[in-house]
Image (cartoon, grey):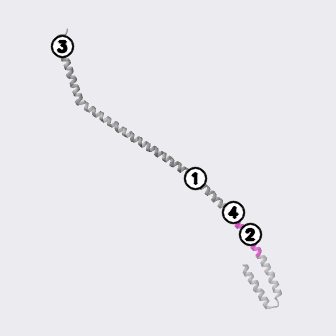
Amino acid sequence: MWTSEVVISTIFRLLNFGVICFVAVYLFKTKMLPGIKEKIAAKYAALKELMTQNKDLLDQQKDLNREIKEQEMFGKQLYDQIGIWSLFFEQQLKEQKEQQAALGLQAVKRAQLQADNKVTREENLEIISAALAGAEQQLRAQFSSQKEGAAFSSAVVQQMRKELR
């Protein structure tokens, strides 16, 4: 069954197979494995860098979210402040309108009072002028014979006219 040629042939086949495997393993370890290790190391370094970038981006996202919340709070505070200012401004505007209306009413009252005073003064001037004319006639009638009486009555009438003006 087994002949020596078959056994020797099988041994050499096994030996050749072993040598080929040894050469393949040797070539794989010396030539290919360092390149593969380098690629694995590069991929691992790239993965590590990506993980670091991911962590940094997450930190940035947290910071941005915090900043957005702060900006929203600031915006809300500003909006509330604007509302307060708006109410204050409206109140001031209302008060100013009321003051202007009151001043306008006072001006109308003052103008009416001045007009009334002017009419009263004119009436008083007419009455006083008439009274002076009557007084002058009476004084002249009483003192018509005396020179001093005429001078006195003229001086009194002139003084009264000066005071009226």
Of residue 22 and residue 112, the one placed in the foreground of this image is 22
Q: Are marks 1 and 3 in contact (CB under 8 Å)?
A: no
Give the residue type at disc 2.
Asp
> Splitting the image into 4 quarters, where does residue 24 fall?
top left
Q: Are marks 3 and 2 in contact (CB under 8 Å)?
A: no
Where is residue 112 shown, x and y percent of the image? 72, 67
The residue where tag 1 is placed is 84
Mark 3 or mark 2: name the one nearer the start of the chain: 3
From the image, which quarter does the C terminus lie in? bottom right
The residue where tag 2 is placed is 116
Residue located at (34% from left, 37% from top): 48
Give the residue type at disc 1.
Ile
Mark 4 or mark 1: name the one nearer the start of the chain: 1
The residue where tag 3 is placed is 7
Mark 4 or mark 3: name the one nearer the start of the chain: 3
Distance CA(mark 4)–CA(mark 1)? 31 Å
Give the residue type at disc 3.
Val
Secondary structure under tag 2 reads helix
Mark 1 or mark 2: name the one nearer the start of the chain: 1
Magenta residues, start to end: 105-124
The residue where tag 4 is placed is 105
Mark 4 or mark 2: name the one nearer the start of the chain: 4
> Splitting the image into 4 quarters, where does residue 143 fall?
bottom right
Distance CA(mark 1)–CA(mark 2)? 47 Å
